[in-house]
Image: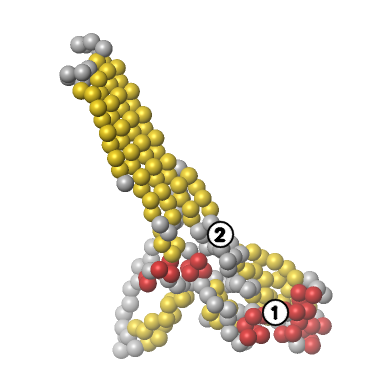
Amino acid sequence: MSASYGFGNLETKGFNVLAAYRHDQQSQIKSTEREFAKTSYIPFDFCGNHYIYDRTSTATIPANVTATFNNIPSVGFSPYLKKNGSCLQMNYVSLNNTATTQNCAFDFVQTVEVVAENKRDSLFLKAALNVSDKLQLFADFAFSRFDITARIAPSTAPFTIAANSAMSSQYVAPYLTAQQLANVKSVSGKCGTYDWVKPRSSSASVFAWSRRHRCRWAWTCGT
């Protein structure tokens, strides 16, 4: 939306005033509202082979945990996956799992946005006055304000769990062997600080900072 107004005439009245205003507003566009940006986990076929483009995060919701032991190889797992046999919504079974690792992976891209909610207001004022044939007074005023509300991906929150705590007894101990339980050295994990009710947001005025990643793909089909 824009509007402008002016009155006066320098040649006939000796003065002129001009005012111009513009308002721009952009609604939020979530990543899930665009097919090309809705996920970081993309299965696809190429040249008769099956592939998965995977940029999911190990900072899952709920968390993965890692347990280390005295003289025994460490293990990593998702308590949720162990209990339910599948990962929670917005999570996938990690493609990096091994015999000693059964983690989930968080699709953080579903929590971000393609375009942040923003608005801009601009005002321009100009006045001129002919004092004499050789002298003219003038004044210019310009004002602009830009507000943006950016909803960002969840931050990673590392944590530790005491081996003899109630949390360890509920979420870790049931999935360890008797030998592992007797030799627990430490239990740690990391999760994404995501609010399932209302995603985190941050507001900034005047300016916004952004980062872009660019990648190039090249494929050759072999015979």
Q: Which mark is residue 74?
A: 1
Q: In the image, what residue type sits under mark 1?
A: Ser
Crowding at dot 2, Cα within 10 Å, few <14 / some 14-19 / many 20+, comes out as: some
In what element is the residue under mark 1?
loop
Give the residue at mark 2. 200
Q: CA distance from mark 2 to mark 1?
A: 34 Å
Locate residue 181: give its quadrant.
bottom right
The image shows residue 56, relative to residue 157, as above or below, that is: below
> Sequence-wise, which precedes: disc 2 or disc 1?
1
Nearer the observer, 27 or 175: 27
* x and y percentages locating residue 128 in the rendered image: 27, 21
Locate residue 42: give its quadrant.
bottom left
The image shows residue 3, relative to residue 170, as above or below, that is: above
Q: In the image, what residue type sits under mark 2?
A: Arg
Task: Kindly identify the residue that appears in the image at 21 percent across and 18 percent down.
Answer: 13
Task: Kindly identify the residue that appears in the image at 39 percent across and 35 percent down.
Answer: 143
Task: Kindly identify the residue that appears in the image at 42 percent across and 41 percent down.
Answer: 145
Left/right placement of residue 187 relative to residue 212 reads right
Left/right placement of residue 70 relative to residue 101 reads right
Task: Report the colour scheme.
Answer: secondary structure
Q: Residue furthest left?
A: 12
Q: Quadrant of the C terminus?
A: bottom left
* x and y percentages locating residue 159 in the rendered image: 70, 66
* x and y percentages locating residue 78 in the rendered image: 64, 79
* Residue 163 can be seen in this image: no
Nearer the observer, 213 or 42: 42
Q: Which mark is residue 39?
A: none
Crowding at dot 1, Cα within 10 Å, few <14 / some 14-19 / many 20+, comes out as: some
* Residue 106 can be seen in this image: yes
